[in-house]
Amino acid sequence: MSVKYDVSQSSIQGPLIAAAVFGDLATLSTVLRLYAMHLRGLRPGLSEYLLLVGVFLMYGAMSLLYIMTIYGGMGRHTADLPPEALIITLKSLLSVEITYGTSLGLVKTSIALFFVRIFGAKPSFNVAVSISLFIDITIKDTCGNRPAAFMVAGVMNVVTDFMVISLPLPHVWKLKLNVHKKIGLTSVFGVGVVISVISVVRLISITKLDFTDPTYTLLDPILWTVL
Protein backbone atom coordinates (compact mmCIF):
# COMPACT_ATOMS: atom_id res chain seq x y z
CA MET A 1 0.00 0.00 0.00
CA SER A 2 1.32 3.46 -0.93
CA VAL A 3 2.27 5.86 1.85
CA LYS A 4 0.22 9.05 2.15
CA TYR A 5 2.32 12.16 2.80
CA ASP A 6 1.22 15.08 4.92
CA VAL A 7 0.21 18.14 2.87
CA SER A 8 -0.33 20.59 5.74
CA GLN A 9 2.83 22.56 4.86
CA SER A 10 1.84 25.80 3.10
CA SER A 11 4.46 25.52 0.34
CA ILE A 12 3.18 22.05 -0.54
CA GLN A 13 -0.45 23.21 -0.45
CA GLY A 14 0.21 25.98 -3.00
CA PRO A 15 -0.15 23.90 -6.20
CA LEU A 16 -3.13 22.00 -4.74
CA ILE A 17 -5.01 25.20 -3.89
CA ALA A 18 -4.16 26.73 -7.26
CA ALA A 19 -5.41 23.59 -9.02
CA ALA A 20 -8.71 23.72 -7.15
CA VAL A 21 -9.31 27.46 -7.67
CA PHE A 22 -8.27 27.72 -11.32
CA GLY A 23 -9.91 24.39 -12.16
CA ASP A 24 -13.19 25.83 -10.89
CA LEU A 25 -12.66 29.06 -12.84
CA ALA A 26 -11.96 27.12 -16.05
CA THR A 27 -15.11 25.08 -15.53
CA LEU A 28 -17.20 28.19 -14.79
CA SER A 29 -15.93 30.08 -17.86
CA THR A 30 -16.64 27.07 -20.09
CA VAL A 31 -20.18 26.70 -18.74
CA LEU A 32 -20.82 30.45 -19.19
CA ARG A 33 -19.56 30.30 -22.78
CA LEU A 34 -21.90 27.41 -23.62
CA TYR A 35 -24.79 29.12 -21.82
CA ALA A 36 -24.21 32.35 -23.76
CA MET A 37 -24.36 30.38 -27.03
CA HIS A 38 -27.59 28.72 -25.86
CA LEU A 39 -29.16 32.12 -25.14
CA ARG A 40 -28.27 33.27 -28.66
CA GLY A 41 -29.65 30.10 -30.19
CA LEU A 42 -26.25 28.96 -31.46
CA ARG A 43 -25.12 25.35 -31.64
CA PRO A 44 -21.72 24.35 -30.30
CA GLY A 45 -19.11 23.91 -33.02
CA LEU A 46 -15.66 22.39 -33.29
CA SER A 47 -14.24 25.19 -31.14
CA GLU A 48 -16.52 24.28 -28.23
CA TYR A 49 -15.97 20.53 -28.57
CA LEU A 50 -12.18 21.01 -28.51
CA LEU A 51 -12.57 23.22 -25.45
CA LEU A 52 -14.61 20.56 -23.63
CA VAL A 53 -12.01 17.87 -24.36
CA GLY A 54 -9.27 20.27 -23.22
CA VAL A 55 -11.07 20.94 -19.93
CA PHE A 56 -11.62 17.19 -19.42
CA LEU A 57 -7.89 16.57 -19.87
CA MET A 58 -7.20 19.43 -17.46
CA TYR A 59 -9.14 17.50 -14.80
CA GLY A 60 -6.86 14.54 -15.46
CA ALA A 61 -3.74 16.69 -15.02
CA MET A 62 -5.15 18.14 -11.79
CA SER A 63 -5.83 14.64 -10.44
CA LEU A 64 -2.26 13.60 -11.23
CA LEU A 65 -1.01 16.65 -9.35
CA TYR A 66 -2.79 15.43 -6.22
CA ILE A 67 -1.30 11.95 -6.71
CA MET A 68 2.21 13.41 -7.04
CA THR A 69 1.76 15.39 -3.83
CA ILE A 70 -0.06 12.88 -1.62
CA TYR A 71 1.52 9.62 -2.79
CA GLY A 72 4.70 10.80 -4.53
CA GLY A 73 5.95 13.16 -1.83
CA MET A 74 6.28 16.20 -4.12
CA GLY A 75 7.69 19.12 -2.14
CA ARG A 76 10.11 16.93 -0.22
CA HIS A 77 13.74 16.15 -1.00
CA THR A 78 14.20 12.97 -3.01
CA ALA A 79 16.86 11.73 -0.57
CA ASP A 80 14.21 11.66 2.17
CA LEU A 81 11.76 9.55 0.15
CA PRO A 82 11.62 5.82 -0.66
CA PRO A 83 12.19 4.76 -4.30
CA GLU A 84 8.48 3.93 -4.73
CA ALA A 85 7.50 7.56 -4.07
CA LEU A 86 9.99 8.83 -6.65
CA ILE A 87 8.62 6.40 -9.25
CA ILE A 88 5.07 7.59 -8.54
CA THR A 89 6.15 11.23 -8.96
CA LEU A 90 8.05 10.68 -12.21
CA LYS A 91 5.35 8.48 -13.77
CA SER A 92 2.71 11.03 -12.80
CA LEU A 93 4.88 13.86 -14.14
CA LEU A 94 5.17 12.12 -17.50
CA SER A 95 1.39 11.74 -17.62
CA VAL A 96 0.94 15.39 -16.60
CA GLU A 97 3.18 16.55 -19.45
CA ILE A 98 1.07 14.55 -21.92
CA THR A 99 -2.33 15.63 -20.59
CA TYR A 100 -1.24 19.23 -19.89
CA GLY A 101 0.34 19.69 -23.32
CA THR A 102 -2.63 18.15 -25.12
CA SER A 103 -5.12 20.16 -23.07
CA LEU A 104 -3.24 23.41 -23.70
CA GLY A 105 -3.03 22.70 -27.43
CA LEU A 106 -6.76 21.96 -27.67
CA VAL A 107 -7.72 25.09 -25.74
CA LYS A 108 -5.48 27.32 -27.88
CA THR A 109 -6.84 25.71 -31.05
CA SER A 110 -10.34 26.33 -29.71
CA ILE A 111 -9.50 30.02 -29.19
CA ALA A 112 -8.00 30.28 -32.68
CA LEU A 113 -11.12 28.70 -34.21
CA PHE A 114 -13.25 31.11 -32.18
CA PHE A 115 -11.30 34.01 -33.69
CA VAL A 116 -11.79 32.53 -37.17
CA ARG A 117 -15.53 32.33 -36.51
CA ILE A 118 -15.60 35.99 -35.52
CA PHE A 119 -13.16 37.55 -38.01
CA GLY A 120 -13.71 35.46 -40.63
CA ALA A 121 4.41 22.17 -46.81
CA LYS A 122 4.66 20.81 -43.24
CA PRO A 123 8.18 19.51 -42.40
CA SER A 124 8.49 16.61 -39.98
CA PHE A 125 11.18 14.52 -38.34
CA ASN A 126 11.41 11.53 -36.01
CA VAL A 127 12.44 11.77 -32.38
CA ALA A 128 13.45 8.85 -30.16
CA VAL A 129 11.93 9.11 -26.70
CA SER A 130 12.91 6.72 -23.91
CA ILE A 131 10.12 6.33 -21.34
CA SER A 132 12.43 4.35 -19.03
CA LEU A 133 14.97 7.19 -19.12
CA PHE A 134 12.27 9.64 -18.05
CA ILE A 135 11.06 7.73 -14.99
CA ASP A 136 14.36 6.18 -13.83
CA ILE A 137 16.96 8.80 -12.90
CA THR A 138 19.62 6.11 -12.38
CA ILE A 139 19.81 5.37 -16.12
CA LYS A 140 22.77 7.05 -17.82
CA ASP A 141 21.86 7.48 -21.48
CA THR A 142 21.96 10.08 -24.24
CA CYS A 143 18.60 9.25 -25.83
CA GLY A 144 16.64 12.24 -24.67
CA ASN A 145 17.23 15.23 -22.45
CA ARG A 146 14.76 15.87 -19.63
CA PRO A 147 15.57 19.56 -18.97
CA ALA A 148 15.67 20.34 -22.71
CA ALA A 149 12.29 18.68 -23.25
CA PHE A 150 10.69 20.83 -20.56
CA MET A 151 12.41 23.98 -21.86
CA VAL A 152 11.22 23.41 -25.45
CA ALA A 153 7.66 22.84 -24.24
CA GLY A 154 7.87 26.01 -22.13
CA VAL A 155 9.24 28.16 -24.96
CA MET A 156 6.58 26.88 -27.38
CA ASN A 157 3.95 27.67 -24.78
CA VAL A 158 5.14 31.29 -24.47
CA VAL A 159 5.34 31.74 -28.26
CA THR A 160 1.86 30.35 -28.91
CA ASP A 161 0.44 32.49 -26.08
CA PHE A 162 1.66 35.67 -27.76
CA MET A 163 0.49 34.43 -31.17
CA VAL A 164 -3.03 33.73 -29.92
CA ILE A 165 -3.21 37.12 -28.17
CA SER A 166 -2.01 39.10 -31.19
CA LEU A 167 -4.17 37.35 -33.83
CA PRO A 168 -7.41 39.32 -33.32
CA LEU A 169 -5.89 42.76 -32.74
CA PRO A 170 -5.52 43.84 -36.42
CA HIS A 171 -9.14 42.81 -37.05
CA VAL A 172 -10.39 44.71 -34.02
CA TRP A 173 -8.93 47.96 -35.33
CA LYS A 174 -10.54 47.40 -38.74
CA LEU A 175 -14.03 47.23 -37.21
CA LYS A 176 -16.34 50.19 -37.74
CA LEU A 177 -16.33 51.26 -34.11
CA ASN A 178 -15.26 54.41 -32.32
CA VAL A 179 -11.78 54.56 -30.84
CA HIS A 180 -12.98 54.04 -27.26
CA LYS A 181 -14.72 50.76 -28.13
CA LYS A 182 -11.67 49.59 -30.08
CA ILE A 183 -9.46 50.33 -27.09
CA GLY A 184 -11.93 48.47 -24.86
CA LEU A 185 -11.88 45.39 -27.09
CA THR A 186 -8.10 45.52 -27.28
CA SER A 187 -7.95 45.65 -23.48
CA VAL A 188 -10.18 42.57 -23.24
CA PHE A 189 -7.90 40.59 -25.53
CA GLY A 190 -4.91 42.10 -23.75
CA VAL A 191 -5.91 40.34 -20.53
CA GLY A 192 -4.27 37.33 -22.16
CA VAL A 193 -0.93 39.07 -21.59
CA VAL A 194 -1.25 37.98 -17.95
CA ILE A 195 -1.27 34.36 -19.13
CA SER A 196 1.82 35.02 -21.22
CA VAL A 197 3.62 36.52 -18.23
CA ILE A 198 2.74 33.41 -16.20
CA SER A 199 4.13 31.27 -19.03
CA VAL A 200 7.39 33.23 -18.91
CA VAL A 201 7.64 32.81 -15.12
CA ARG A 202 6.92 29.08 -15.56
CA LEU A 203 9.72 28.87 -18.12
CA ILE A 204 12.13 30.49 -15.66
CA SER A 205 11.08 28.05 -12.92
CA ILE A 206 11.71 25.12 -15.29
CA THR A 207 15.35 26.20 -15.67
CA LYS A 208 15.76 25.53 -11.93
CA LEU A 209 14.36 21.99 -12.18
CA ASP A 210 16.91 19.48 -10.89
CA PHE A 211 16.28 15.84 -11.83
CA THR A 212 18.65 14.65 -9.13
CA ASP A 213 16.05 15.95 -6.65
CA PRO A 214 12.84 16.10 -8.73
CA THR A 215 10.28 15.67 -5.96
CA TYR A 216 11.52 18.87 -4.27
CA THR A 217 12.37 21.08 -7.26
CA LEU A 218 9.12 20.26 -9.10
CA LEU A 219 7.03 22.34 -6.68
CA ASP A 220 7.43 25.76 -8.36
CA PRO A 221 7.19 24.53 -11.99
CA ILE A 222 4.03 22.60 -11.14
CA LEU A 223 2.53 25.62 -9.36
CA TRP A 224 3.08 27.88 -12.39
CA THR A 225 1.88 25.11 -14.70
CA VAL A 226 -1.42 25.02 -12.81
CA LEU A 227 -1.77 28.81 -13.02
Image: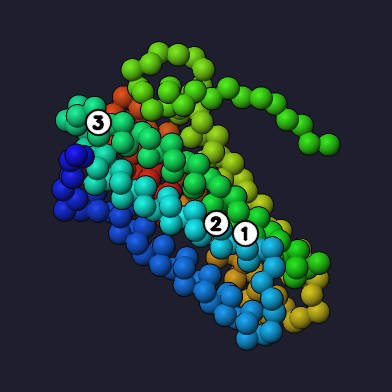
Where residue 15 appears, x then y in whole percent? 32, 52
Q: CB of mark 3 within 8 Å of CB of mark 1?
A: no
Residue type at the position of mark 1: Leu
Residue type at the position of mark 2: Gly
- The residue under label 2 is 54
Residue at disc 2, secondary structure: helix
Q: Quadrant of the N terminus?
A: top left
**Number of residues whose C-alpha sits closer than 10 Å to that of mark 2, classed few (under 14), some (14–19) or many (20 or more):** many
Residue 50: which disc? Answer: 1
Where residue 172 appears, x then y in whole percent? 74, 70
- The tag earlier along the polypeptide, 3 or 1, is 1
Q: Is residue 136 left or right of residue 162?
A: left
Q: Quadrant of residue 147?
A: top left
Q: Is residue 142 above or below residue 109?
A: above
Q: Quadrant of the C terminus?
A: bottom left
Where residue 58 appears, x then y in whole percent? 47, 55
Residue at disc 1, secondary structure: helix
- Residue at position x 39%, y 38% from top? 93
Residue at disc 3, secondary structure: helix
**Number of residues whose C-alpha sits closer than 10 Å to that of mark 3, classed few (under 14), some (14–19) or many (20 or more):** few
The answer for how far apart the CA atoms under marks 1 and 2 are is 6 Å
